[in-house]
Each structure stands twice: as C-alpha cells, then as structure tokens.
Image (cartoon, rainbow, N blue to C red):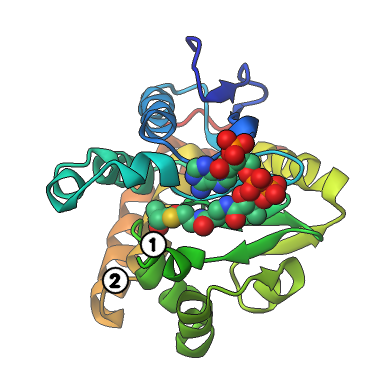
Amino acid sequence: MSDYQDILVSDADAGVITITLNRPEARNALRTNLLKEIAEVLDQVNTDNTINAVVITGGEKVFAAGADIKEMAELDAVGVMNDPRPTYWRRIAQFPKPIIAAVNGFALGGGCELMMHCDIVIAGDTAQFGQPEINLGIIPGAGGTQRLLRTVGKSMAMQLVLSGEFISAEQAREFGLVSEVTIPEMSYTRALKLAKTIARKPPIAARLAKESLLKAYETTLETGLNLERKAFTLLAATEDRNEGIAAFMEKRRPNFQGK
Ligand code: CAA
C-alpha cells in the first residue's frame, strides 16, 4: 500500500491489515483527507483476495475526536451540501469484508460513528464514547442518530445525542456498542487475533454473513429472511462449502480457497 498522510497501513499479515488513525496532534480528528485515505485503502482491500479482514485503531488516549471542527468551521450550508465526506463514509459503510475496531481513549462524534461503521468493536476499559455534537450546535452527521438508535435503543441514543455526555466502555458493552472490553494494552491484540480468526474463515461466507446481518438494520424481517435464504442458497454453490463439510466428515482442518 502507498504512503498516506493521516493513517498508517500495516503490511498484510495472515489475511489482515491494520489501519491506524495517525493525526495525534489533532486527536485523530477525521479531516476529509483522513476519511478519503481510509476509503481508498478499503477500496484496494476489496479487490485483494489475500486480505479478508481489517482492523481499525487509533491512539492510546484518543481513538478519534470526531469530525475536524476547524475544517468544518470553513463550511457554510452550501459547502456542507457539496462536502465530499459523505461519499467517503458511504464507501466505508459499503465495504463488504469484516472490520474490527480496537478502541482506546475517546471515541467522540465522528469517531464514535467511525467505530459504528466497524462490524465488531473491542474497547480498552478506559475508553469513552460520546456524541458531543450538540455542544457545537450541530447533530451527528455520519449516521450517528440512525446507527445509535438501532444499536443502543431509544433512551440511550437520545441521552447520548441530546446531552453530549460520554459513556464508559463497560456501559458501551452493556448497550451493545462494543462486544468485548479488555485492559487497554490488550484491545488491539485481541482485535487482531479476532480478525485473523475471521480471515481464516471462508471469505464468501463471511461476506454474505456481514451483508445479511447489516440488512437487518434496515429492512422488514420477511425481506431479511429472504436475503438470508438467498445467501444461504448461493453458498451451496461454493467450493468452500463443499470443503468445509468434507473436512468435518473427514475429521480434518478445512482448506478454504475463497471459491
Ligand atoms: N477537530 C479539530 N481539532 C481537534 C478536534 C476536532 N474534533 N479535537 C481536538 N482537536 C485539536 C485541538 O483543537 C487541539 O489543537 P491545538 O493544539 O492546535 O489547540 C489539539 O487537537 C489537542 O486537543 P485538546 O487540547 O482538546 O486535547 P485533550 O487531550 O485535552 O482532549 C478531547 C481530547 C477530549 C478529544 C478533546 O480534544 C475534544 O473534546 N475534542 C472535540 C470532540 C468533539 O466535539 N467532537 C465532535 C466533532 S463534530 C462531529 O464529529 C460531527 C460528525 O458527526 C461527523
């Protein structure tokens, strides 16, 4: 992968790459270029059959402090309307392979929203989550109102968005924003281990599982069940499904090829 200004991208290891947000001087504020770089990396990974999962992480004290407020201050309503950032967010949301977030420190505003674009979140126990946009006279602008409500339910979503108060990693876990809480030193290690486990799974099944699960956010049960059935049927036509079943019968480890 080429050099980037606002992120670090690791070499692929066991089918996983790590994207590290790298603007410590601005607390990893998500300026346009940073989002563009994430979207570009994900686009490349999308067509790279050797990479099956991605980890996104930030710094020790701040995962990401949200949209870049200084950049945002330059935009009037027409500027916001023509802002390219929503297109980068959409590319991140539509990335079909699993993304695991390792979060330490503050995940605020767009930082919390970036985390909600990830499929699994592992948080260090000192992490804090919040949508403080209300303090700036705005509201979450990268899906926060929609994804929060679907994830944590109405009362907590309202509390976070209306009060701007933060919640702890443990509260975030209770409310389903985070799946596991570790000591801060272990969050990345755990996320990477999980990503490597997922990267060893048959990739077409992982992709269709992600698509089916995410569809549940936005559709009726009947439509979701139909999508799941179609994905399930499609998988019956893959070599990996035959290999997985054969390996089980023959009491050996499967050798998935992504076919
Ligand atoms: N945008 C731009 N710059 C930011 C920033 C942000 N979101 N957050 C921090 N910075 C900058 C500060 O301006 C400061 O820069 P200078 O050194 O040039 O003054 C530098 O980063 C260090 O900041 P602090 O001194 O505040 O660092 P801290 O460690 O004491 O506090 C923090 C960390 C709690 C994250 C605090 O910086 C903070 O509250 N940041 C803003 C959080 C916020 O309001 N986020 C919502 C943004 S709006 C949004 O995200 C909209 C959306 O939905 C997409």
- Labels 2 & 1 near each other (Cβ < 8 A): yes
Q: Which residue in the structure is indicated by mark 1?
A: 214
- Tell me, for residue 106, which label it has, or none: none
> What residue do we see at 59% from left, 68% from top?
177
Question: Up-down: is 4 above or below 108?
Answer: above
The amino acid type of the residue labelled 2 equals: Glu
> What residue do we see at 52% from left, 84% from top?
159
Q: Can residue 236 be seen here?
A: no
Circle 2: is it few (<14), some (14-19), or many (20+) Cα within 10 Å? few
Question: Up-down: is 178 above or below 167?
Answer: above
Taking depth in this image into account, of 26 and 92 the one nearest to the observer is 26
The amino acid type of the residue labelled 1 equals: Leu
Specify the farthest residue to the bottom: 155
Where residue 148 appears, as percent x and y from the top left, is 46, 72
Where residue 17 appears, as percent x and y from the top left, is 59, 27
Left or right position of 148 against 177 = left
Question: Up-down: is 168 above or below 258?
Answer: below
> What residue do we see at 86% from left, 44% from top?
185
- Tell me, for residue 218, which label it has, or none: 2
For the C terminus, the quadrant is top left
Where residue 241 appears, as percent x and y from the top left, is 48, 44
Q: Can residue 159 be seen here?
A: yes
Element on which disc 1 rests: helix
Circle 1: is it few (<14), some (14-19), or many (20+) Cα within 10 Å? some
Taking depth in this image into account, of 79 and 233 the one nearest to the observer is 79
Taking depth in this image into account, of 11 and 69 the one nearest to the observer is 69
Specify the farthest residue to the top: 2
> What residue do we see at 73% from left, 58% from top?
127
Q: Is mark 2 within 8 Å of ligand 1?
A: no
Left or right position of 166 against 240 = right
